[in-house]
Amino acid sequence: MINTHDILETIQMIDQENLDVRTITMGISLLDCADSDAGRACGKIYDKICRCAGELVKTGEDISKEYGIPIINKRISVTPVAMVAAASGGDPVRYALALDRAAESTGVNFIGGYSALVHKGFGPGDLRLIESIPEALSRTERVCSSVNIGTTKAGINMDAVAKMGRAIRLAAERTADRDCIGAAKLVVFCNAPEDNPFMAGAFHGPGEPDCVINVGVSGPGVVRAALAKAGDCSISEVAELVKRTAFKITRMGQLVAQEASRRLGAPFGIVDLSLAPTPAVGDSVAHILEEMGLECCGAHGTTAALALLNDAVKKGGVMASSQVGGLSGAFIPVTEDAGMIHAARSGVLTLTKLEAMTAVCSVGLDMIVIPGDTPEEVISAIIADEAAIGMVNSKTTAVRLIPAIGKQPGEELNFGGLLGSGPVMQVNRSSPARFIGRGGRIPAPLQSLKN
């Protein structure tokens, strides 16, 4: 039975505490679009996406109006394009342009899947796609790209790590006149999930259904408000409160996911529990950590507080949904979080501290602006460090760095919208070139042998 207090509480969360469904993402398989002619393959891709997702935006808007729940983004993820390009041939950029046209026709804000899975080596089409990423992202508006360079089972492909350092830098250079937005749409993964609804890392894994609905919820402001009301309670009580709040947030996400699935005639995949912040005041993961008792995010104690938050979010969310997946935890994207932006500007939050925090949260070094003249081998080494954390700890980690071309530490880069803005952060420039230049593969850790 629905409790009146619960209804009023949810209304308050939406009106005053930035509660929303961050995204409805439709995953679409493109495997049946392969063709011996690349042009025909691109035509099939466009047609299938428009056919499956033609009503996605309208459906999200209808649900939002009927239930009074803000649904911020409607997005599409597709089969890693490297797989289709390998079967169909041709310039991979043609597929990116087809995806961009389909995204524009359906009205979604982003389409993810200009991707390659190269954790154990390069298959046909992978190298061509990776080398094409800077051009593809510079010539499209809504296409997002990701590359998985490592897993706990396979180790880390260091040849791919080296290539991605170069790809990130070139993506920034090619879009330097647009605040280096190309790099903001590119993420490098270790242990990438196949059902992640969040951009820029969303792709439709080969083990997924032909078409599926995944939903990402969000509610940092709700969690922070709950902690503020609780006052000076113990750490155990903080964990319990976060868990209960995450349960309520996830129930709303489950409702939206099931309703979207029914209306669109596509199976319900997962709800991603991740607390995804925005630059809006009151919608910050950093402010949750500060509400726990830290003077500023990045201070000593931040990693412990984030570990508590991430664990409690997972425990509460898992009880609220029959199908949990994606990343499911707490995001710490610097430019997309008002509290993180402030902490980075003040110098309390550093790249080194962020790396430590990624050992206990979702994803990793996300939306971090670095000096525009950072060498590509340093970018590759940052990727390798982050991938090692994910590989050894059997968790997803990722890197989304934006070299701010022409800018140095202390200056700012501003993307606007959900991508936000932030200061250029200091990077250790001691050279890892010889290490990165060795190539090869870092072997999988002993804990990978679980069969």
Image (cartoon, rainbow, N blue to C red):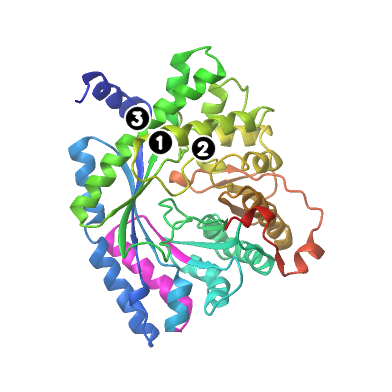
**Residue 294 appears at what percent x and percent y?**
61, 23
Which element is circle 3 on? helix
Q: CA distance from mark 2 to mark 1?
A: 22 Å
Q: Look at 41% across and 67% down and name the residue there.
A: 79
Work out whether residue 373 can be spotted: no
The answer to whether 94 is drawn above or below residue 286 in the figure is below
Q: Look at 37% across and 31% down and name the residue there.
A: 247
- The answer to which of 317 and 188 lies nearer the viewer is 317
The answer to whether 262 is drawn above or below residue 88 in the figure is above
Residue under pointer 2: 337
Q: CA distance from mark 3 to mark 1?
A: 8 Å
Residue under pointer 1: 317
**Residue 429 appears at what percent x and percent y?**
78, 52
Work out whether residue 292 can be spotted: yes
**Residue 132 appears at what percent x and percent y?**
54, 73
Q: Residues within 10 Å of mark 3 (few under 14, many from 20)?
A: some
Residue under pointer 3: 248
Is residue 105 part of the magenta span, yes or no? Answer: yes
> Which part of the image, by quadrant, shows the N terminus?
top left
Question: Of the residues tagged 2 and 1, which is closer to the observer?
Answer: 1
Q: Amino acid at mark 3?
A: Lys
Mark 2 vs mark 1: which is more N-terminal?
Answer: 1
Which element is circle 2 on? loop
Q: Quadrant of residue 180?
A: bottom right
Mark 3 vs mark 1: which is more N-terminal?
Answer: 3
The residue range painted magenta reads: 89-114
- Residue 35, numbered circle: none
Which element is circle 1 on? helix
- The answer to which of 182 and 214 lies nearer the viewer is 214
